[in-house]
Image: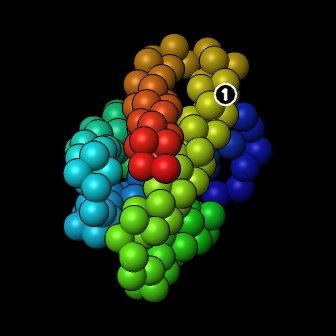
């Protein structure tokens, strides 16, 4: 699709985060399994469930624009998740691995936070109040997940 208007740009970015959320959803079970600390395991599992809800909300945003949900390959998220997988394959010490996974997970959250922040700003600009609430709900969960990961990392240090 050629981007010509702000709405096109919004939709392209929506496809990007849709792809990212689906990719994250696939990666999270492996991370939950590999996490040693109870707190980290729980936080990642909770966020896996939240992520399912986020995909549902994105489905609804697509519907508001009368589009069927579609992802657009996002290499940024693929690379961040590849880094997490590398840690999981290479790091043997469980505490070091937890720290590495937290670092990668926070990189994921920050990516999501920046995408949702941008989408929210553009939804406002486009006067799409209907999409704002859904995007805001996802952004809130990403910020909460990020803060929780910081807490877990600091408690372990
Ligand atoms: Fe997410
Ligand atoms: Fe997230």
Which corner quadrant of the image does residue 113 belong to? top right
| 78 or 106: nearer the viewer | 106
Q: In this view, does 115 lie above or below 125?
A: below
* Residue furthest to the front: 157
Residue 127, x across and y down, in percent: 61, 15
Would you name the residue on which mark 1 appears? 122
**96 displayed left or right of 76:** left
Q: How crowded is mark 1: few (under 14 residues within 10 Å), some or many (20 or more)?
A: some
* Residue furthest to the bottom: 90
Residue 44 in view here:
no
Q: In this view, does 144 lie above or below 50?
A: above
**Quadrant for the N terminus in the image:** bottom right
Residue 127 in view here:
yes
Residue 72, x across and y down, in percent: 53, 61
* Residue furthest to the right: 4
Q: Number of labelled discs?
A: 1
**142 displayed left or right of 40:** right
Label 1, secondary structure: give it: helix
Residue appearing at x 76%, y 44% in the figure:
4
Which corner quadrant of the image does residue 115 belong to? top right
Residue 84, x across and y down, in percent: 48, 70
Q: Is residue 110 above or below residue 29?
A: above
Residue appearing at x 51%, y 14% in the figure:
129
| 118 or 88: nearer the viewer | 88
Which corner quadrant of the image does residue 88 belong to? bottom left
Residue appearing at x 35%, y 39% in the figure:
54
């Amino acid at each position: 699709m050629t981007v010509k208007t702000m709405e096109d740009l919004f939709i392209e970015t929506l496809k990007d985060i849709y792809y990212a959320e689906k990719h994250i959803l696939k990666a999270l079970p492996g991370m939950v399994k590999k996490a040693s600390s109870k707190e980290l395991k729980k936080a990642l599992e909770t966020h896996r469930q939240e992520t399912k809800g986020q995909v549902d909300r994105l489905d609804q945003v697509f519907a508001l624009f009368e589009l069927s949900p579609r992802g657009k390959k996002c290499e940024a998220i693929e690379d961040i998740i590849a880094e997490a997988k590398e840690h999981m394959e290479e790091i043997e010490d469980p505490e070091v691995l937890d720290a590495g996974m937290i670092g990668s997970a926070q990189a994921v959250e920050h990516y999501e936070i920046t995408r949702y922040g941008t989408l929210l700003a553009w939804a406002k600009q486009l006067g799409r109040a209907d999409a704002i609430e859904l995007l805001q709900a996802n952004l809130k969960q990403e910020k909460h997940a990020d803060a929780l990961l910081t807490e877990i990392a600091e408690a372990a240090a």
